[in-house]
Amino acid sequence: MVNKTNKRAAPGTRKTLFRWLATLYAFCALALIPWVIRLGDILPKRSVSPHWHSAWVGLDVMLIAALALSAWALVKRSAWAIMTTSIVGGMLVLDGWFDLLTSSRGHEFETAVLSAIFIEAPLAALSFWIAIRCIRELNTMPKVRARIRGRLKPKKMLQ
């Protein structure tokens, strides 16, 4: 946030912003609890969706895009890798979850369980680990440390 009079953020403004955002997220999490309980009561036990095929194909296309963006960001050693690998991790968790919950009994369910255990969960964990490593590496860069200490202008931080 920029103060228009002196072009610098007022002391504490950033801290205040993050506290406000944390409060907003906490409120949203708490507000969703009664909604989820209500949803559990009102949703039908069985449903047929006319867009089932599009939903699954669309999810996988978005996962392909996120994986490709992550590969690009990692090759370029870009700070964007933090975001893209986190997105991939989240998408893989969702993919495994919905595979398990939407599969039929028998072979389809067994395949979903094996896929979740040996593909989605390990790749999600790897993606989150990469994001954490990228954050740690970024925080050890001299220009980033200088910016954190207030000795470098923001636009030069990642150059």
Image (spheres, rainbow, N blue to C red):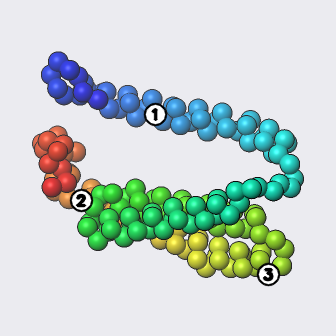
Q: Quadrant of residue 68?
A: bottom left
Q: Find out whether the residues at labels 1 and 2 contact each other: C-beta distance under 8 Å.
A: no
* Res. 79 in view: yes
In the displayed structure, would residue 65 be above or below residue 43? below
Cα separation, mark 1 vs mark 2, equals 26 Å
- Specify the label residue 107 is tagged with: 3
As helix, strand or loop, the secondary structure at mark 3 comes to: helix
Q: How many marks?
A: 3
Q: Residue furthest front?
A: 50
Crowdedness near tag 1: few (<14), some (14–19) or many (≥20) residues, C-alpha within 10 Å: few
Q: Find out whether the residues at labels 3 and 2 contact each other: C-beta distance under 8 Å.
A: no
As helix, strand or loop, the secondary structure at mark 2 comes to: helix
Give the residue at mark 2: 140
Cα separation, mark 3 vs mark 2, equals 48 Å
As helix, strand or loop, the secondary structure at mark 1 comes to: helix
Tell me the quarter of the image containing the N terminus: top left
- Give the mark toward the camera: 1 or 3: 3
